[in-house]
Each structure stands twice: as C-alpha cells, then as structure tokens.
Image (cartoon, rainbow, N blue to C red):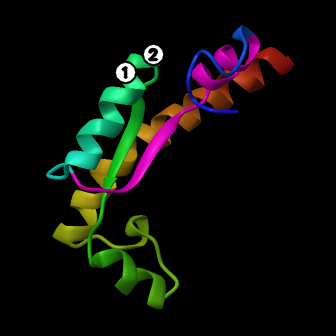
Amino acid sequence: MALSGRWYGEAERQLLTKADLEANRYRTDRSASRRLEEFLVAEGLLLTARIPERDIYSDLARDGLTVFDRTNKTAVGQQQAWLPLVRAVEMSLRKSDQSDE
C-alpha cells in the first residue's frame, strides 16, 4: 500500500488518519524533513511529534534509561519533544476506556 490516495481505498485512509504519526531522529534543517512534512500535509496527515536526533539518546540507551528517567536540562528539553505524543496516547487510552464502559 503506497501513501498516495490512488493506491488505497477510503477505509485505509480513515485508518491512517486515526494513527498518530511521529518523526523520530527528525532534523528540521534537512530538505528531506521538509519534503516529508509537505507530503504528509498533501495527504491530509500531520505529525503528532517531532523527536530530534540528539546524543543524549545513545547515552541513555547505554544505561537502559529514557529521557523521562533524567531531570537534567538536556533530558527535560527532549521530554518536551515527546509530550505531544504522550498526550495523544493518553487521550486515546482515555477514549478507549470510556467506550469500554
């Protein structure tokens, strides 16, 4: 299935638009990043979060940690990048719990 409206049906498009898209190792200064965002907008899709590539992630992985396990300035800055995705997941879980009641 290609991400062009010509290659999939309306049911698949609706499913895709319900997904939260996240750009990992995102570099705002790259033309590829701009092209990605332009493509997604043209398809009616938006990124929920843009997680930039930073050295902190390899350091944290080495120690088996996440950015939410640290409180230094660098980690707190990266936590801010994750918050839109965390909030979207939490909202989705709340909606799911309410529909189960």
Q: Position of residue 67 (x, y in %)?
A: 38, 68
In the displayed structure image, the side of residue 87 where residue 100 appears, left or right: right
- Residue under the point 60% across and 30% down: 19
**Above or below, 7 relative to 54:** above
Magenta span has 22? yes
Quarter of the picture holding the N terminus: top right
Q: In the displayed image of the protein, which residue is found farthest to the right?
A: 100
**Above or below, 1 relative to 83:** above
- Residue under the point 46% across and 89% down: 63
Q: Which secondary structure lies at badge 1?
A: helix
From the image, tell me which residue sits under label 2.
Answer: 44
Find out whether the residues at labels 1 and 2 contact each other: C-beta distance under 8 Å: yes
In magenta, the rendered stretch is: 11-27
Q: Position of residue 79 (x, y in %)?
A: 33, 56
Near mark 1 (Cα within 10 A), the count class, few <14, some 14-19 or many ≥20, is few
Q: Nearer the viewer, residue 17 or 98?
A: 17
Q: Position of residue 71 (x, y in %)?
A: 28, 70
Magenta span has 36? no
* Label annotation for residue 41: 1
Q: In the displayed image of the protein, which residue is found farthest to the top?
A: 10
**Above or below, 2 relative to 85:** above
In the displayed structure image, the side of residue 30 where residue 82 appears, left or right: right
Q: Nearer the viewer, residue 55 or 79?
A: 55
Q: Nearer the viewer, residue 89 or 14?
A: 14
- Residue under the point 46% across and 43% down: 22
Disc 1/disc 2 C-alpha distance (Å): 5 Å
